[in-house]
Image (cartoon, rainbow, N blue to C red):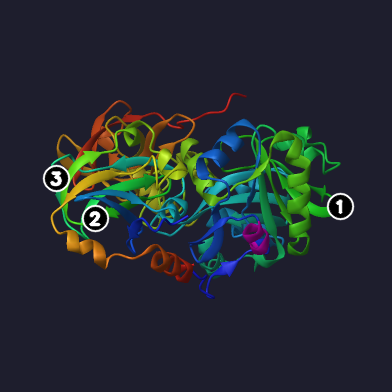
């Protein structure tokens, strides 16, 4: 479930690096906890986001929940499918339903994030 | 997260776990918020039938020669006017006119009234009624003796009919009958909190698991699904029904909440009457209205409502409506703006988002 190619946060985001571009999403655990996702609010392309700060929100039927930036940088792309099909986040949160791509301003931040094994252990302990 | 041991659980808690429900703290009770998903459960109730464990709800029984007098003194609707076997929606008020709770009153006998009250209010309600009891009546908090199941949806009556010899078609809406369900004594009430047809049954806790499974088995041919409190909330919101702690609380009177119809001024004295008479004479300052979002975004409880760029009210409940495919909600607005078709803005995380007031209920089932 949790790919070794990704790094994770305790706030349940993931990032996958490709050169200096990071693709950001929320984890399968997060989508399960949220339930039916009906709305995704993402920053505009060009927005600078900061590791640990709010970078949008995800709403389920029940509640709204912040997205925290797993890394700092400038948003280069947002996933267009989520505007009309936010439910994709429930179906494929680690694939098709990525949230945004970011050009990292501080690539060393990635090393501070959790590995797949560490994240898995973290959510097991949370249960 | 591990369930804190302080949470109360219904006798069906282990069934919910086995069904893979997501359990949450609901006013001190560990309750299923969803099984398969809120939207799917919601649609199942609108189109077929859903089964809800609502055993967290409390029961209070008033008995005695003056049971009717006490009920009429503490509750706003006219309980003594009920026929035996009839139920109605009512309010328990403080003397200042705000809600202690909203309740269902069932008249079991001339000397026996059965009240269904909100889970987290039950002890408060019980103390409130007891303190006001200067009648020849006994008040009992009997929640421990009942499990309440709601079988809701257009196929609800057909499912339950398979399990009872009581002719359900003879029980009119907001009437009830005492009989058996799958062989166990049950109070079978033609009531609900979904805006859909269906029944609510009250049974002994010892029989809860068996009856739950019997209802699911009987409903299989109709596509029955267990449903959680998440769907219960979206269903009641579409039906424009109040939820204590949201649309109503100690600071809100029935006149503001659009619940004038449960207040019977002509029945004699009752707690809160004087305050409501004064309020009626001076006129209410705010009223509960429905709204639909026009811009993108979902209004949530507590968000501010602006009219003409001025903060004017607040959202009491807000959610996506799975039936209408719109984002809807209820809010309080100043009475001079309390009409359908008024342009309003909801402050969603510091951004004003356009909405418009509409008539409620948002959803009405075809009869």
The residue to which callout 1 is attached is: B183
Query: Quadrant of the rendered structure where residue A53 is?
Result: bottom left
Foreground residue, A43 or A60? Answer: A43
B15 magenta-colored:
yes
Visible residue check, residue B235: yes
The residues bearing labels 1 and 3 have C-alpha atoms spaced at a distance of 65 Å
Per the rendered image, the range of residues in magenta is: B13-18
Foreground residue, B225 or B304? Answer: B225
Q: Main secondary structure of the magenta part?
A: helix
Foreground residue, B240 or B86? Answer: B240
Badge 2: residue crowd in 10 Å (few <14, some 14–19, many ≥20): many
User: Where residue A88 sits in the image (x, y, percent)?
Assistant: 42, 39
B144 magenta-colored:
no
The residue to which callout 3 is attached is: A47
| Labelled disc at residue A69 | 2
**Do tags 1 and 3 sit on the same chain?**
no
Asked if the residue at tag 1 contacts the one at tag 2, i.e. Cβ–Cβ closer than 8 Å, the answer is: no
Visible residue check, residue B284: no
Badge 1: residue crowd in 10 Å (few <14, some 14–19, many ≥20): few
Q: Is residue B190 above or below residue B67?
A: above
* Disc 1 versus disc 3: nearer the observer: 3
Q: Please tell me whether mark 2 sits on a helix, a strand or a loop.
A: loop
User: Where residue B316 sits in the image (x, y, percent)?
Assistant: 36, 47
Q: Which residue occupies 29% across, 49% down?
A: A24
* Chain ID of residue with mark 3: A
Q: Is residue A32 above or below residue B60?
A: above
Q: Residue furthest bottom?
A: B5
| Labelled disc at residue B286 | none
* Chain ID of residue with mark 2: A
The residues bearing labels 2 and 1 have C-alpha atoms spaced at a distance of 57 Å
């Amino acid at each position: 479930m949790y790919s070794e190619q990704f790094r994770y946060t305790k706030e349940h985001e993931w990032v996958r690096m490709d050169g200096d571009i990071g693709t950001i999403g929320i984890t399968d655990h997060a989508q399960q906890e949220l339930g039916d996702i009906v709305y995704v609010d993402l920053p505009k392309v060009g927005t600078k986001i900061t590791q640990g700060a709010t970078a949008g929100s995800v709403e389920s039927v029940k509640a709204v929940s912040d997205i925290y930036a797993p890394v700092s940088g400038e948003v280069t792309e947002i996933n267009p499918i989520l505007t009309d099909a936010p439910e994709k986040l429930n179906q494929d949160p680690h694939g098709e339903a990525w949230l945004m791509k970011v050009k990292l301003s501080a690539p060393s931040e990635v090393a501070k994030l959790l590995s797949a094994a560490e994240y898995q252990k973290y959510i097991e302990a949370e249960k | 997260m591990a369930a804190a041991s302080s949470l109360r659980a219904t006798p069906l808690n282990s069934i919910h776990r086995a069904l893979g429900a997501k359990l949450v703290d609901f006013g001190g009770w560990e309750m299923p918020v969803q099984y398969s998903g809120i939207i799917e459960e919601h649609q199942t109730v609108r189109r077929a039938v859903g089964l809800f464990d609502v055993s967290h709800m409390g029961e209070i029984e008033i008995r005695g020669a003056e049971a009717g007098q006490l009920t009429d003194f503490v509750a706003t609707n006219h309980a003594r006017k009920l026929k035996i076997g009839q139920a109605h929606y009512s309010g328990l008020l403080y003397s200042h006119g705000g809600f202690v709770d909203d309740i269902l009153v069932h008249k079991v006998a001339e000397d026996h009234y059965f009240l269904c009250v909100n889970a987290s209010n039950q002890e408060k309600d019980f103390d409130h009624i007891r303190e006001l009891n200067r009648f020849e009546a006994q008040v009992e908090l009997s929640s421990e003796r009942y499990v309440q199941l709601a079988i809701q949806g257009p196929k609800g009556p057909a499912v339950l009919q398979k399990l009872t010899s009581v002719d359900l078609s003879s029980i009119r809406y907001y009437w009830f009958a005492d009989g058996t369900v799958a062989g166990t004594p049950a109070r079978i009430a033609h009531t609900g909190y979904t805006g859909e047809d269906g029944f609510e049954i009250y049974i002994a806790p010892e029989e809860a698991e068996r009856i739950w499974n019997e209802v699911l088995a009987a409903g299989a041919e109709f596509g029955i699904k267990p449903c959680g409190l998440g769907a219960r909330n979206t269903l009641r919101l579409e039906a424009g029904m109040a939820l204590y702690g949201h649309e109503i609380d100690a600071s809100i009177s029935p006149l503001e909440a659009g619940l004038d119809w449960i207040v019977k001024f002509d029945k004699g004295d009752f707690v809160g009457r004087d305050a409501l008479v004064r309020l009626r004479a001076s006129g209410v300052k705010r009223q509960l209205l429905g709204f639909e979002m026009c811009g993108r975004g979902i209004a949530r409880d507590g968000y501010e409502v602006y009219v003409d760029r001025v903060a004017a009210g607040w959202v009491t409940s807000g959610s996506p409506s799975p039936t209408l495919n719109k984002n809807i909600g209820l809010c309080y607005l100043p009475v001079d703006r309390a009409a359908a078709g008024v342009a309003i803005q909801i402050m969603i995380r510091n951004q004003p988002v356009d909405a418009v007031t509409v008539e409620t209920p948002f959803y009405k089932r075809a009869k």
